[in-house]
Image (cartoon, grey):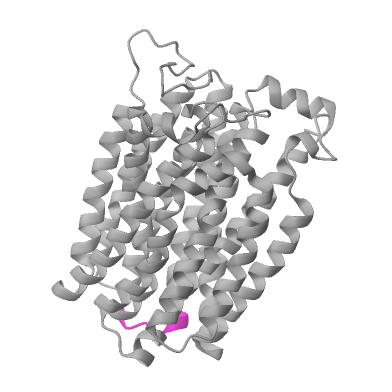
Amino acid sequence: MSSLGRARWGIGALLAGGLLVNFADRTVLSVAAPQLADEFGWSLSRLGVVLAAFSWSYGLVQLPAGALVDRIGVKWLNRVAVTLWGVASLLLAVAGGLGLIIVSRLLLGIAEGPFMLSAAKATATWFPTAERGRATALFDGATKLANVIGLPVLALVVSTWGWRAGFQFTGVLSLLFAAVWWWRYRDPAEHPRLGAAERAHLAAGGARVTDRPRGSVLRPVLRSGRLWTMALGFACYGYAINVVLTWMPEFFQRQFGTRTLGSGLYSAVPWIVATVAELALGGWLADRLVRGGRDPMKVRRTVLTCGLAVGASVGLAGTAPNGPAAMGWMSLSLGGLAVAAPAAWSLPGLLAPPGAVGAAGGLMNFANAAATTTGVVFTGWLAEVTGSFGAPFVFAAAVLGAGILLYRRLLAPRPGQAPAAAPRTEGDEALAL
């Protein structure tokens, strides 16, 4: 790696750092939810609406955000967006009622909308195909690591100083990252540390170094049946993992009577398992198989379907007899979902038309956000009606079953398809792998 240079891995680390902060901003409300519910007298149904507010705006901006990532570029769009993360968190820290809390979460959803798409776009630009498993696992694994670090830290802050302190903490953290982003992120064409050897390595390996839109970026994406299948498959993954992300601290507190700090520690363990599983299996192993000559699409198909199948064990967590048993099932489930995640996030960079990686990722994340919003609200309602989280978690397992079928259809071999290439059709063009 030293002879090639390491500029691309510096960019990968920057993207991972951004998502650590990004997901801490999202997660703090889940940690603070019991205190908020007590202070304002919210039922589980009302709390579900508050928790879902972020997903409403986040989902609605995905398609335009994807197009903006392709048009404006990763650097400038996120210089503005990242700064708004901090503003939204600090605004919530001074909220005095339901209205401003929802407005703050809506603003946070809009501001954070472009970043995951930017990470997928930047990874397709900065990394060759045979390194994208590790690169994608690096930035997506940060979303799991954020819960490993963030849940106990945020639980400590909230339990010690109150829920407002949690939002003050994440707001300041976001503004600090905004300064780092302005200073460090550059595209390959203007990066001062990208040498000739590393640049040639990117181009020879299939990196989209000069990926630019050709006409409309949304039209070919929205007309592609394959990309819609990709998006719906990811929505099934997103439904399950975001139900767990949003409701896990509340689940441990209500189901087993744990306190805020205890629920944060219980919730952190499954995310430790998820982080290790994603980096070791979803990233490194997938890249090793591709470098060894395996068909990249077949590798991703196997990883996705097996990962989602293991993830369906979330259905057993809601009926666990005690907290440690529930934590075990949660750990197994999130480990499986984490293994699937890098393969899922690598698909826009492999299947999108030229210049439309951001738009394809936007479609995928739009479907994910729509499923998440539904799942968060539905989980709160169903848990309130049934008196436990057993039924909502079983339903999440069934949704993952639908995701397996969708991904099997999307990545099934096609008649006449070359082993390492996706077909080129109008509105559904894909790069040769």
Name the outermost residue toward the top. Answer: 416
Please name the residue shown 42% across and 47% down the image. 365
Q: Look at 41% across and 87% down and name the residue there.
A: 97
- From what the image shows, is residue 277 above or below residue 36? above
Q: Left or right: 241 with respect to 148?
A: left
The number of numbered badges drawn on the structure is 0
Q: Is residue 384 magenta?
A: no
The one of 20 and 93 positioned closer to us in this rendering: 93
Question: x, y (%) of residue 411?
Answer: 36, 26
| Image coordinates for residue 74, horizontal then vertical, percent | 64, 45
Q: Quadrant of the N terminus?
A: top right
Residue 332, visible in the rendered structure: no
Task: Locate residue 130: give its quadrant.
Answer: top right
Horizontal side of 136 relative to 380 (left or right) equals: right
Q: Which residues are magenta?
A: 256-262
Residue visible at 44% across and 68% down in the picture: 106
Question: In this picture, is 411 found above or below 76?
Answer: above
How far across and down, in percent of the image, does residue 321 sit? 24, 71
